[in-house]
């Protein structure tokens, strides 16, 4: 860095250092972590769907096709989001690398946002985008062992579903990272995240709507065990309207709120 | 434009009831090599961490090239390269990745090729040329220290803040670090803490001494050496018992350090009154028939003596 250039005043971005921090977080996904996720998500998604759709003629007929993909995503991705995000800040604190990174020209908010963005993007890529693309390509090309061929859904609708599930991941990652700014232990953070996930999974949508602004999008996917189609599956497979869209907005707002709260709390931490 | 790289005014830090820093004032001139001395627990690392924005001050402020580190820490840190006392890097990154990662956290764009060359050059410079692809988690303490120095230098900062840069290095590594610091003279300001007084005397222009959270002395090294007790070297042969007893009885003699060297004794006599010693020390020694003085001269003052007398005086008060 030329010294004269350094002396001259330069405008600093709102989140200084965010680019470098996110780049560093994403770089981690290119190594062993990425390989582990690639293998795990391929086994969970592709093998399970192949089994349900083609090989197992005793499989649950009502879960066949893209509805099954949506169920797998809803069950597995929030758990993975909690597992990854509960370690993000705690690991940096425990290994004393947080103080090293924060001694560089980065803001505390950038540090928290980079954790949320980095972990969310990594998980979205390996669990949603990669697996979704594969499923979208192969599933309509095969004939199930039992029942009618699966139709390829409208691409734009499929993109919306991918977006909603990506938002669910961002929500859980932001919530968990926010919790770690208050609680410095992995166990309690993971337990709280798990409780939120179970409550959303088991609570009927109307009850969730009573306690949230517009109902979180995750609430729409409750009542999995009954086996009936959920609003998102109906939207994708039967071209039904997506209702209520306010729940998508409220989930995004909640994720943003967790990010802001986490950043504010982390700014007070001393190293 | 300020001529001071770092200014600290009336800095206080409390951890609960413990008052760790008491009204610390420091002025580090730009382009100087400034040693920060003090015993363990004096508050050196705490001061540095406040400058780096890792700790909040309980009072006072610190300025880096005129920028308040508390109000505009990011802008201030953009001009600093920092080596913490305990080096911890992401264990999953290679040495090359650690240094590149740090470079990407600073403002300003560099081409991939340019950065790669700079990173490799630095790793060669600190002696990690053959370990560029080794994971940081697999480095020894000394290697991690070398990597810490490389990452602090990667953006060619205007101010280097190094917390114990020679700690955990072997003598060769220590020599390399000192040479590196000397080579930075005129290119950057170096503010570093250490316990190795010999190193400070070799490379620093100025020093500050921190004891119990207070700056008890600061200034150019020559000025600080004036504060040291004067000592005299005496080589003496024979029965020295009476001579030593007489000398120790004088009020201006603070300490007699005696070592046996073959047939003669080598004494270091510390005094707190130069003129009294000048007039009376030699007559007191030669007035004994049982012993002969074969060498007698004032010793060179060392920073260690200055440091011990400053810290000692502070503890006594």
Image (cartoon, helix red, strand yellow):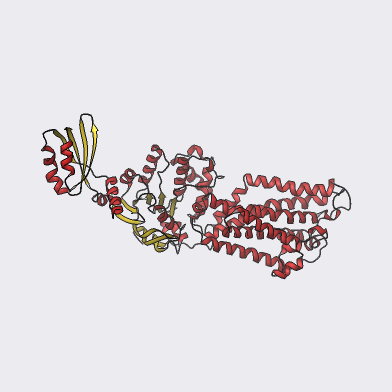
Whether residue A5 is visible, yes or no, is no
Q: Quadrant of residue A65?
A: bottom right
Whether residue A61 is visible, yes or no, is yes
Of residues B237 and A142, the one nearer the viewer is B237
Of residues B245 and B98, the one nearer the viewer is B245
Left or right of residue A247: residue B59: left
Total numbered circles: 0
Write the residue at 72% across / 53% down: A76
Write the residue at 65% across / 58% down: A192
Of residues A266 and A248, the one nearer the viewer is A266
Residue B49 against residue B134 in the figure, above or below: below
Q: Position of residue A176 (x, y in %)?
A: 63, 58
Q: Position of residue B134 (x, y in %)?
A: 53, 40
Most extreme residue toward the right is A147
Left or right of residue B3: residue A251: right
Q: Quadrant of residue B249?
A: top left
Write the residue at 73% across / 47% down: A42
Q: Position of residue A46 (x, y in %)?
A: 76, 48
Left or right of residue A198: residue B314: left
Q: Position of residue B16 (x, y in %)?
A: 45, 60
Left or right of residue B206: residue A22: right
């Amino acid at each position: 860095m030329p010294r004269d250039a350094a002396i001259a005043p330069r405008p600093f971005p709102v989140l200084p250092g965010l680019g470098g921090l996110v780049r560093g977080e994403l770089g981690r996904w290119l190594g062993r972590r990425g390989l582990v996720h690639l293998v795990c998500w391929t086994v969970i998604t592709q093998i399970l769907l192949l089994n349900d759709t083609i090989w197992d003629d005793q499989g649950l007929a009502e879960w066949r096709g893209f509805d099954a993909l949506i169920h797998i995503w809803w069950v597995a991705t929030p758990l993975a989001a909690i597992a990854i995000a509960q370690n993000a800040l705690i690991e940096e604190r425990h290994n004393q690398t947080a103080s090293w990174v924060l001694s560089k020209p980065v803001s505390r908010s950038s540090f928290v946002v980079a954790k949320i963005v980095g972990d969310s993007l990594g998980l979205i890529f390996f669990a949603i985008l990669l697996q979704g693309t594969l499923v979208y390509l192969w599933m309509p090309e095969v004939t199930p062992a039992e029942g009618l061929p699966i139709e390829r859904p409208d691409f734009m609708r499929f993109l919306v579903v991918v977006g909603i599930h990506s938002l669910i991941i961002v929500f859980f990652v932001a919530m968990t990272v926010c919790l770690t700014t208050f609680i410095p232990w992995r166990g309690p953070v993971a337990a709280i995240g798990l409780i939120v996930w179970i409550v959303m999974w088991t609570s009927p949508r109307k009850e969730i709507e009573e306690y949230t602004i517009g109902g979180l999008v995750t609430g729409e996917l409750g009542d999995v065990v009954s086996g009936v189609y959920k609003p998102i599956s109906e939207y994708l497979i039967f071209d039904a309207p997506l209702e209520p869209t306010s729940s998508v907005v409220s989930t995004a707002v909640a994720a943003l709120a967790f990010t802001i709260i986490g950043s504010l709390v982390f700014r007070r931490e001393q190293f | 434009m300020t001529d001071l790289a770092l200014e600290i005014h009336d800095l206080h830090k409390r951890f609960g009831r413990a008052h760790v820093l008491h009204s610390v004032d420091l002025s580090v001139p730009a382009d100087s090599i400034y040693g920060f001395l003090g015993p363990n627990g004096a508050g050196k690392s705490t001061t540095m961490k406040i400058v780096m924005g890792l700790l909040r001050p309980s009072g006072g402020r610190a300025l880096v090239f005129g920028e308040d580190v508390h109000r505009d820490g990011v802008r201030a840190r953009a001009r600093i390269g920092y080596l913490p006392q305990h080096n911890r890097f992401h264990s999953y990154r290679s040495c090359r990745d650690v240094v590149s990662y740090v470079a990407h956290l600073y403002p300003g764009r560099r081409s991939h090729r340019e950065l790669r060359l700079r990173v490799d050059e630095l790793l060669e410079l600190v002696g990690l040329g053959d370990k560029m692809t080794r994971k940081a988690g697999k480095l020894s303490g000394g290697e991690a220290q070398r990597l810490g120095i490389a990452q602090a230098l990667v953006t060619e900062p205007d101010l280097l803040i190094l917390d114990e840069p020679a700690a955990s290095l072997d003598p060769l590594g220590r020599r390399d670090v000192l040479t590196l610091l000397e080579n930075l003279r005129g290119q950057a300001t170096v503010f570093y803490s250490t316990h190795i007084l010999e190193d400070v005397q070799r490379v620093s222009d100025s020093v500050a001494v921190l004891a119990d959270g207070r700056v008890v002395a600061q200034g150019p090294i020559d000025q600080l050496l004036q504060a040291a007790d004067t000592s005299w070297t005496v080589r003496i042969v024979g029965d020295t018992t009476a001579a030593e007893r007489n000398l120790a009885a004088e009020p201006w003699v603070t300490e007699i350090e005696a070592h046996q060297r073959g047939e003669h004794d080598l004494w270091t006599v510390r005094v707190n009154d130069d003129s009294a010693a000048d007039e009376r020390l030699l007559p007191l020694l030669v007035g004994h028939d049982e012993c002969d003085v074969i060498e007698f001269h004032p010793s060179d003052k060392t920073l260690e003596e200055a440091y011990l007398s400053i810290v000692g005086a502070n503890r006594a008060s």
